[in-house]
Amino acid sequence: MTKTAKTYGDALYELAEESGKAPAILEELETLEGILRENPAYVKLIGSGSLKKEERCGLLDEAFRGRVDSYLLNFLKILSERGHFGELSGILEEYRARHYEASGILEVKAVSAVPLSDAQRDKLTQKLREKTGKTILLREKVDPSVLGGLRLETAGKSMDGTVAGEIRRLGSILNELSV
C-alpha cells in the first residue's frame, strides 16, 4: 500500500466514523472496488487528465449518485481531481484495517488442502476468538499444494502447520547439515 492510499484511507475512515457511517461506507467501498476492478477502462478514464474535471465529476455523478453515500461520491471526485483514483484498492485496504481494528475484528485467512468442515471451522474460529479476544472473520482458501494441515495468515503474520511447510523446514535443516 502506498503512503497516498494510507493517507486517503485514514481520512475517509475518520470522516465516516465521525458521521456514524463507517460500516455502511466500508460495504459500499468494497462493492465499488469490485465494480471498478471489473471495469479498468472506466478507472483509466476517470483517472485520466484528458477529460476536464467537470466531465470526470459528471461521469462519477452519472454512475454513482444515489447508489453510494454522498461522502463516498465526493471522495471519489476528490481522488479523480487529484489524480489518485487508481489508489482505490489501497484506500479500501487501509479503511478496512482501521474499521476492523476499531470494531475488534480480526481477519484470518485459513489455507488448507481441502475445504474445512463446519465443525473444523467452528472450532478454529472459537479457538482464535479465545486467544485474541476479537471477533474472527475467517476467510478460507483451498490450495491442494499444501498437501495437508493448515496455514493461518493474519496482519502480516503466518503460522504454517501444513505438510508442505514441514517438508520445506526439513529440507532447510538437511541443507544446513550437509554443508
Image: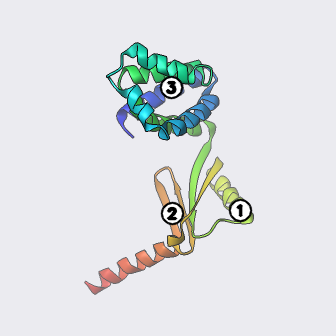
Q: Amino acid at mark 1?
A: Lys
Check residue 20 in the rendering and tell me which mark sits there, or answer none: none
Q: Position of residue 132 (x, y in %)?
A: 61, 51
Mark 1 or mark 3, which is nearer to you?
3
Mark 1–mark 2 Cα distance, whole angstroms, equals 17 Å
The residue that appears at 67% across and 56% down in the rendered structure is 125
Camera-nearest residue between 62 and 91? 62
Structural crowding at the residue carrying mark 3, measured as other residues with C-alpha within 10 Å and reported as few (<14), some (14–19) or many (≥20): many
Residue topped by disc 2: 159
Instruction: Give the mark nearer the N terminus: 2 vs 3.
Output: 3
The residue that appears at 50% across and 71% down in the rendered structure is 145
Residue topped by disc 3: 12
Figure quadrant of residue 148: bottom right
Instruction: Give the mark nearer the N terminus: 1 vs 2.
Output: 1
The residue that appears at 28% across and 86% down in the rendered structure is 178
Structural crowding at the residue carrying mark 1, measured as other residues with C-alpha within 10 Å and reported as few (<14), some (14–19) or many (≥20): few
Q: Position of residue 20 (x, y in %)?
A: 64, 23
Query: Which quadrant: the C terminus?
Result: bottom left
Residue topped by disc 1: 123
Callout 1 touching callout 3 (CB < 8 Å): no
Considering only vertical position in the picture, is 99 above or below 72? below
Instruction: Give the mark nearer the N terminus: 1 vs 3.
Output: 3
